[in-house]
Amino acid sequence: MAKARPSVPARLGACLLGLTLMTSVTDAAEWRSLFNGRDFTGWDKYLAALPGSEEPLGWNHDPRNVFTIVNEDGAPAIRVSGEIYGSITTQTQYTNFHLRLEFKWGPQRWPPRATVGRDSGILYCAVGDVNPSTGWMTSVENNIMEKGTGQWWSVNGAIIDTEGEWITDENEPWVPYKREGKGERNIVYRPGGPRLTAPNYSGITPEIDMEYVFGNWSTNEVIFWGGNCIHILNGHVNLVATLPRYTDQDGRVVPLLDGKIQLQSEAAELFYRKIQIQPIDEIPAEHLKQLPSFAFNDDGFTPLLTGDALRHWKQSGPGGFEVRDGVASANGGMGLWWFSERKFKNFILRGEFRQSGAKADSGVFVRFPDPGSDPWVAVNRGHELEIGDPSPENPTWRTGSIYPFKASTKANTKAPGEWNDFELTCLGHNYSVRVNGELVTTWTDPEGRSLEGFIGLQNYDDGMTVSYRNLRHKELP
């Protein structure tokens, strides 16, 4: 905890700040409609070329009325004829949100998909220019397709990670979506399965089909937070994928963390209604266990407490750390032992900690500037993964919290004297914490503190000791 246990005013201030954050989250969580029922206010249309032409119709030119407002089943809806490939695109960009809408199919189908499953989709975190041949931006897809709603497909070269296995002739009979050609390559999503990266020529399909029968409205949802993608069809999670990204023109890998939302036109008639969105600053608690770590294993991690790395650690403030056989044990304090060789931006930090007593206090600090001789620089300008009391009076003092802003759902720690694994992921302004393999905290920093800085460990003068070992990091795009 970033303390010398705070004074009463400081603790009161932290509690008031917590109340302020709780209030703002509650207010922000109200659903907002993206469709006013009358016109396309807030949206832009894009249409590719007419059949037999090579020139796209472009933005906001819809001579065939591919996108129209109609009354369907007694309520306003957006009708997509599907006759021409294209999209409607929000004029606003979104990050960290819960999106939901209702859809149902119409009877019309068009070449080149007139004899295969009806197809459309939601594209989110859509960035860059549209592909003129489709009207779609580089994005994450939640496909709307007969027998395949919830699918991810690569759009304009995007890739993503998931749990599952490559579809083969042996397992395909049990998968609702059937491949449309022998050369098609895709993955079936299987929670807890091997970790795979779906490349830019493939897709990921659910292993269940929860769509209602033709002619009925189904509800399709996207929960997106900090590079985590959850697709939900009629109340059932049918696909989870992580770390969507693409390679830009300069060869840099870029994460898809925000962008516009597109609704596709893709050779099938369908209707959309009740299009709503709400901002979120964490993953809903009921979905925490469904999200795997961004890192498949320990490949690509660099150790920070062994070999040459040890000479780059410096002490700020009183006390220090003693290192023996790769174990760094704190003494005295309150001080900060920090790795001075370089700053870190987007990364995963893994390690193990051991407490000599149940309330032995420490913390892992990230993204703070050079503290010089003042360890409070890390407190005031970085962020802290709390190591401390498993059952404190203030929830943000609990192990696994981002102190003092976001309480963990639980400490999930072992008995004093045993080693605990931790993982802290920093991506943009999003932070997530795992303790002993379980995701216990997800949080978006509303203040937008630094996106880059140093890593440090806290030593705290409470008469107990916290030790660390196997500290290592891996860069994220």
Image (cartoon, grey):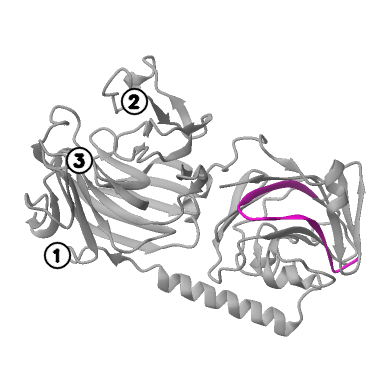
Check if mark 3's residue and mark 2's residue have beta carbons within 8 Å: no
Q: Secondary structure at mark 2?
A: loop
Is 70 placed left or right of 368 in the picture? left
- Sequence-wise, the earlier of marks 2 and 1 is 1
What amino acid is at disc 2? Val
Residue stretch in magenta = 332-353
Q: Which residue is mark 1?
A: 39
Look at label 1 and name its amino acid. Answer: Asp
Residue 175 is labelled as 2
In the displayed image of the protein, which residue is found farthest to the top?
A: 170
Tell me the kind of residue under disc 3.
Answer: Glu
Residue 206 part of the magenta-drawn span: no
* Foreground disc of the pair 3, 2: 3
Is residue 346 shown in magenta? yes
Residue 437, position in %: x, y?
64, 43
* Disc 2 from disc 1: Cα separation: 39 Å
On the image, the x and y values in percent for residue 119 come to 22, 37
264 relative to 31, above or below: above
| Mark toward the start of the polypeptide (3 vs 2) | 2
